[in-house]
Amino acid sequence: MFPYLGLKASTKQSQIDERLQYHPQVFEFFTTEQDVTPSGLIHLRDMIEYVKAAGVSKIVIHHPMKFQGIHNEVAVDQTSHRDGYHFLMRSSEALIKLAIETDTQVLIHGGYNSPLSEILSNYSSIEAARKVVFSRLDYFQSIGGDHVMFENSISPLYDYGDPELENLVIEHRYRLCYDTSHGFIVLHGDNAKLQASMAHLHDQIVHYHFVDSMGKFHDSLELGKGAIDWSALKPVVNMNATNIFEINLKDQMNSQEMRNSYQYLKACWQTSV
């Protein structure tokens, strides 16, 4: 029942076992560059089956955030960053293929937070770079269908909260992951605008990253420890979606902050109108 106890872990079995003891209903794999090597993909497939065998049917694979220590940007320039571009495309294609074969989901970030100076060193304008992002997302959607979704960032290349971009997202009929902290940061901590953004994209959201924030920078706080008004979000969330709690952990072998966030949101929404 929504909200789900959704937990995230790497592909290390020790982390996975720590999460599984709490019987999550949704499980998200945080993958790295190593997880999309031939041996890494075999291990990832094994861990997907391991999680399924524990009774979890709702599984998401989070595309690697970095390549060679740099954010794995969808807008990576094909000419000046040839290796990064090939990694983006090969890893996305491989994970989408795996997701189709295992009936799971792949989450791809539409962007991260490359400095404007870096974006403009490769493209003539933000609009030109954004066109590249949407072209590549169109391709991933064409091969992934109902097995791929796209997450908002705090980059102007793919930031929910920007009405112009949201209208494009709706026009392209993307399946979406909405990260609440990213939206809140883009909107400078404005709760009313966050609610409006989530309501606007409601029908296309299939997954949430529930994360608190002070709305100033990427702080990934436990729910209730930031400035997001969680009670006010209940009427605007899509309860047909899945969710995880993507919180910074003090110890990767202890999912306490994620589980605390689940209990907080459940209690909050039980007392909300």
Image (tube, rainbow, N blue to C red):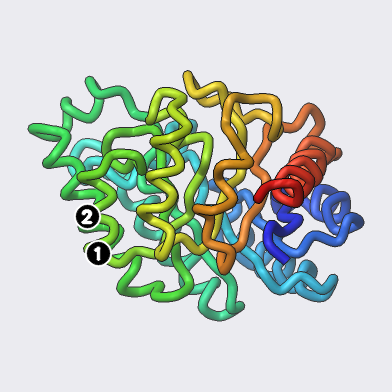
Query: Which amino acid does the dot numbered 2 rest on?
Result: Leu
Judge by depth and name the residue closer to the eye, 265 or 181.
265
The dot on residue 20 is none
Residue 148 visible within the image: yes
Q: Is residue 36 visible?
A: no
Residue 168: mark: 2
| Cα–Cα span, label 2 and label 1 | 6 Å
The mark total stands at: 2
Helix, strand or loop at label 2? It is helix
Given the image, on which type of amino acid does mark 1 rest?
Answer: His
How crowded pointer 2 is (Cα within 10 Å; few <14, some 14-19, many 20+) is rated as few
Residue at position x 34%, y 33% in the image = 155
Identify the image quadrant of residue 222.
top right
Instruction: Identify the residue shown where x is 77% and y is 67%.
Output: 51
Residue at x-position 43% and y-position 27%:
190
The answer to whether mark 2 and mark 1 are in CB contact below 8 A is yes
Q: Is residue 216 above or below residue 53?
A: above
Look at mark 1 in the image and give the residue it sits on: 172
Task: Tell me where residue 135 appears, x and y as whole percent.
Answer: 21, 58
Estimate the x, y position of residue 247 in percent, counting from the top left: 68, 36
* Nearest the eye: 57 or 261: 261
